[in-house]
Amino acid sequence: MSRRIAVGVLGATGTVGQKLVRLLAGHPWFEVRRLMASERSVGKPYGRVVHWLEPEPLPPDLAAMPVEPAEPGGCALVLSALDAAAARSIEPRFTAAGCAVVSNASAHRLDPVVPLVVPEVNPDHLQLLRRQPWSGSLVTNPNCVVAGLALVLKPLQDAFGVEAVELTTLQAASGAGFPGVAALDILGNVIPGIANEEQKIASEPCKILGSLADGRVIEAPIVISVQTTRVPIVDGHLLSMSVRLGRRTTPARVAAALQRFHAPEHVRALPSAPPAPLALLTHELAPQPRLHVGLGAGMTVSIGQIRPCPLLDVRLVALVHNTIRGAAGAALLNAELMVREGVV
Amino acid sequence: MSRRIAVGVLGATGTVGQKLVRLLAGHPWFEVRRLMASERSVGKPYGRVVHWLEPEPLPPDLAAMPVEPAEPGGCALVLSALDAAAARSIEPRFTAAGCAVVSNASAHRLDPVVPLVVPEVNPDHLQLLRRQPWSGSLVTNPNCVVAGLALVLKPLQDAFGVEAVELTTLQAASGAGFPGVAALDILGNVIPGIANEEQKIASEPCKILGSLADGRVIEAPIVISVQTTRVPIVDGHLLSMSVRLGRRTTPARVAAALQRFHAPEHVRALPSAPPAPLALLTHELAPQPRLHVGLGAGMTVSIGQIRPCPLLDVRLVALVHNTIRGAAGAALLNAELMVREGVV
Amino acid sequence: MSRRIAVGVLGATGTVGQKLVRLLAGHPWFEVRRLMASERSVGKPYGRVVHWLEPEPLPPDLAAMPVEPAEPGGCALVLSALDAAAARSIEPRFTAAGCAVVSNASAHRLDPVVPLVVPEVNPDHLQLLRRQPWSGSLVTNPNCVVAGLALVLKPLQDAFGVEAVELTTLQAASGAGFPGVAALDILGNVIPGIANEEQKIASEPCKILGSLADGRVIEAPIVISVQTTRVPIVDGHLLSMSVRLGRRTTPARVAAALQRFHAPEHVRALPSAPPAPLALLTHELAPQPRLHVGLGAGMTVSIGQIRPCPLLDVRLVALVHNTIRGAAGAALLNAELMVREGVV
Amino acid sequence: MSRRIAVGVLGATGTVGQKLVRLLAGHPWFEVRRLMASERSVGKPYGRVVHWLEPEPLPPDLAAMPVEPAEPGGCALVLSALDAAAARSIEPRFTAAGCAVVSNASAHRLDPVVPLVVPEVNPDHLQLLRRQPWSGSLVTNPNCVVAGLALVLKPLQDAFGVEAVELTTLQAASGAGFPGVAALDILGNVIPGIANEEQKIASEPCKILGSLADGRVIEAPIVISVQTTRVPIVDGHLLSMSVRLGRRTTPARVAAALQRFHAPEHVRALPSAPPAPLALLTHELAPQPRLHVGLGAGMTVSIGQIRPCPLLDVRLVALVHNTIRGAAGAALLNAELMVREGVV
């Protein structure tokens, strides 16, 4: 790949957008060509309008790039960090114009012809692209909690079957974007609920873990009961879950199944794929957001606390970096998979 | 009651101990007569050795009171805020000497002859006192999470039966006492586990919700699966739970059962009993520790998020003030109950 | 005072507005008659539109009260929690209509005919009211930091003279209202600066500590150098300051001057006046926001760390409850003073 | 340098010790050969006894290394992360045995024959080593606040002279080590004071910024007035300061002096030296701990808020990574300087 692929970012000024911009800076395959955002930012230098929250400084060349309107042109590949409402109207304009769109938005995730992909879990779902009626192609990544949940459930599904999940999430403030959660709501507090989150968590894993038949996804029949909460931390969603498996087993076998899980070889070779998608932590008080959220550059899901559940089958706690594995990194990995598969 | 009852506090310098001291200051029935703590504090003025963390100033007369060794004498009633190890050896010295001991420690909670009491739930368990072989009497209150859990489960048990609970807790730092949790462990972080906590949560509710037969407690056969977590807040344990009931019902009926729950009249009349032991909050994002932990002066458990569970029967979130309803206030209410029942 | 005075609240849905509403509920002199807020809330029940953040529940009768537009009528006394821009245009409509307006807004604080009052410091400045050209009257309270600073400087000015102050503030999130500071900006962070705050802190104390001559305020010539910061706490502004006095003295004498400071008798008798406007804390690590912000029901300013400054004269740290002594409580105390002085 | 220098770490299990261990892992010149800690850890694998708080996992080979007692032998170079009391007795045993000791402890910093060095500021102070009476050599780095303060003052001293500093610090929890600050003391709180910190901040800069004459340091006559505070953040000390310069100038010239500051060439070439020791941030609300503490891999001090002080001369805010530039990284850079200068 002698020349890098020109990429546009939709919703470039938001928190996921700027995370994408940072991950794309220095990417071996991609080059940021267009930064697109809403009307009021258009025409101004990106560095002037973005409320930059990344710990690394914004590279000067990107800071100087003028923000453009969200219209197709100039890039065959577009990464979308739009919110759901904007994505619903804007992304189709790009697919209609022949673009490959990789979207973090929830708008089209459950559309039967749109692949909802976690590359280590269901890369074959890209086959749905053949059924897309527009000239471009649209691939989505899941909700930030689901990005971690699907990775944890996949090896369990393969080894034992998964029937049901009881889940309580402890989610970080960055999941709400900026300005997002008000300080007065979350400082020294926990908020028991996140708007629209629970329905996504209950439905998206069934599609991701579904099987392909005749170019369609047959959803996996997994019952997911979830209570979301927001806790006063910056990054990292923690999932406290209990799982009913298809057949009885031991925590040791569950741990072994999670431990040996790995991505298909062509996925493992993608630039943003972590060395291991799952990390089993043996420390007795792991995983912890502040210590472990950055494992695998934010792309590795950490797991701990595996033990028997006296009611269902197995209990465990998982940790997913919500804005990397759960958003920007997820979209980027999907984009890399599309390039690898020749879609872009 | 023309004269107030002299009370001693065991473990008076700890966080629960000082909360007891504050609640006792100005109590209509009780008067702090002795402040007892470990060797290294003995003989010094209480105000000099206590690391006072209460938001109200320590009253000067209590600050000046010399700390005494943990030996019986001078008080017929003793409130114990000792840790489990100390309680195991020290509390028996007091009951042997004829004292009435109300203990917040876990040491004797599961002893078959020791009542484990939440006055609104199982005041009749005081009958166990008759079987105590020592000349005094010992009553315990439950673990801080269980204090809330038992209050939530009691009306459900009465109305529908309770078979099982899937529980994830989000617990405040004050539950660990002082110095307790290190700032470096919890700032911007969540810790998935609390030492020895989960076994208490799984076992204590079965005793509290058990029935009396022949002066013995027959434990309630409730399966409790729990994951504890510590979150960076000061006060208030949040319980995210899903309950399997004995018979099918609707969330509305569950809410109604919780709503109409009240303490027996003689309990309601105790000085530390809240107007209502349970408060159903209808705000869509309730309960929240910072906003609701102080309801009923910290003695009311708040409940919200009641809805169907697609896997068990009903989901809800409860909030308990861990150092008041879950510790100092619980012990005090038990002491009041003992006075009312003529045990003291 | 057999009947309570009807009071209207301007900006009733904001954080200062709701704090006023709570302080007024149960007030011995005042009764909330009108809750006024912006267009989009008008006509709806207050409880439906306010994002209630107080730790006590909103009383049901106030929750049911319909929000009204910000127009005069029905109340001789109006407490304003408007922001500066709204205050600039709305408050004059009320004074023109003959209302007594007590405002927390900065809009008119430096107007030469508008008293900027801290009742314990400069109650005589109410004399400026005689020069107000409108039929009603307008009194303001200072910025939240200045509310504490003026109280600390007053006894020093009286005893030694005050020439200059070097000040760094550590301010709580509640000072920015709601939604105010974004969680992503302040969680685990400090923000070195608050918009428009430093100019208020540098100028308002000079007016408050100024003397009256010919019905005009001669500003006190105090040089104030200030750096503001925002820290991740909910309530309580901490002031780290070094003061150059008019004449040399000792920290002990500074402490004594602060210790013996008290309000004039007619101010001390007001319902919202604290037992002591200043509290000298002797604990070596005081004052601390979480422990001391509630002293005097939030109306007492705590002081500690008094010691020599090797460069100016004396160093100390003060703590002010920014939304009570620094906002809602300040306005209320001013309203009480106006009633006491016969202005209302 | 074909082979790496064997290094021992004293106090390897503490927070600064483990930061040193992490920085040494993969260091181009150094290789960790001995991990030394207190009696109760000796003989156990390092990974078993260290409470690892770094965001990167502990490398397995280091985890397996047995902890050794703090006795000389096997390493010509020792990095000490001992606390002051331990350092006072232990470090001399190493220098007596001929070791080169680089210490982060405060014990010997003000000893007239011990260089207190910030390599970009006073590398020439290594000349003091000639006066050391023991066979080895001992070099110290300053207190964590001073590490940043000295770097900020050096260019001002060179350009304008520095007479006095008014300073308020906002310090992170990691500065207190582990367990250090209790969560209950700092969650939602600010603590106005840090034991023994202010005297170090007032004295150490005078030595660092002093001049050499006859192989002795003539202290710089700078008056430093400081109030320390602890704030609820993990890493990064913020310094709010006002400086009286030797001669009047403008903020623009102050900024220019800071901007053009750079290390001597031989220091700049050291492996742990950052590209720039100072970074002037132009964003109006910079520097912020969470966003900027990692600049230059934690070795760059960020500066913002430069403006005139109406009382002294110039105000500014600086940010220093307290456990890297202020501790482990400082020691490491000193060790590199000693190697470069042929002391090791």
Image (spheres, coloured by chain):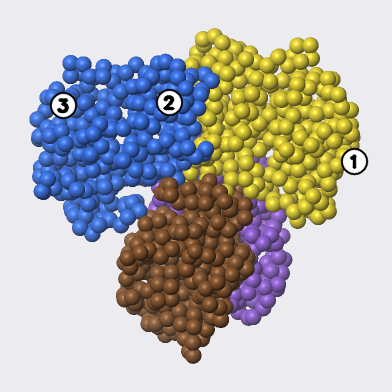
Chain colours: A brown, B purple, C yellow, D blue
Q: Which of C290 and A226 is in front in this view?
A: A226
* Residue at mark 1 to residue at mark 2: CA–CA distance: 58 Å
Q: In this view of the protein, can residue D316 be seen by the observer?
A: yes
Task: Say left or right for B93 vs C241.
Answer: left
> Disc 2 marks which residue?
D254
> Disc 1 marks which residue?
C74
Q: Is mark 3 on a helix, strand or loop?
A: helix
Please state which amino acid type lies under the numbered disc 3: Leu
Residue C284: horizontal and vertical position, in percent? 47, 29
Q: In this picture, is D163 found above or below B71?
A: above
Task: Say left or right for C12 vs B234.
Answer: right
Location of the C terminus of chain A by quadrant is: bottom left
Residue under the point 14% across and 22% down? D131
Res C126 → quadrant: top right
Residue A120: horizontal and vertical position, in percent? 39, 74
Q: What element carries label 1?
A: loop
Q: Give me the chain letter of mark 2.
A: D
Q: Give me the chain letter of mark 3.
A: D
Mark in front: 3 vs 1: 3
Location of the N terminus of chain A by quadrant is: bottom left
> Disc 3 marks which residue?
D129
Q: In this picture, is B323 found above or below C168?
A: below
Mark in front: 3 vs 2: 2
Q: Which of A56 and D218 is in front in this view?
A: A56
Please state which amino acid type lies under the numbered disc 2: Val
Q: Earlier in the sequence, mark 3 or mark 2?
A: 3
Residue B51: horizontal and vertical position, in percent? 47, 38
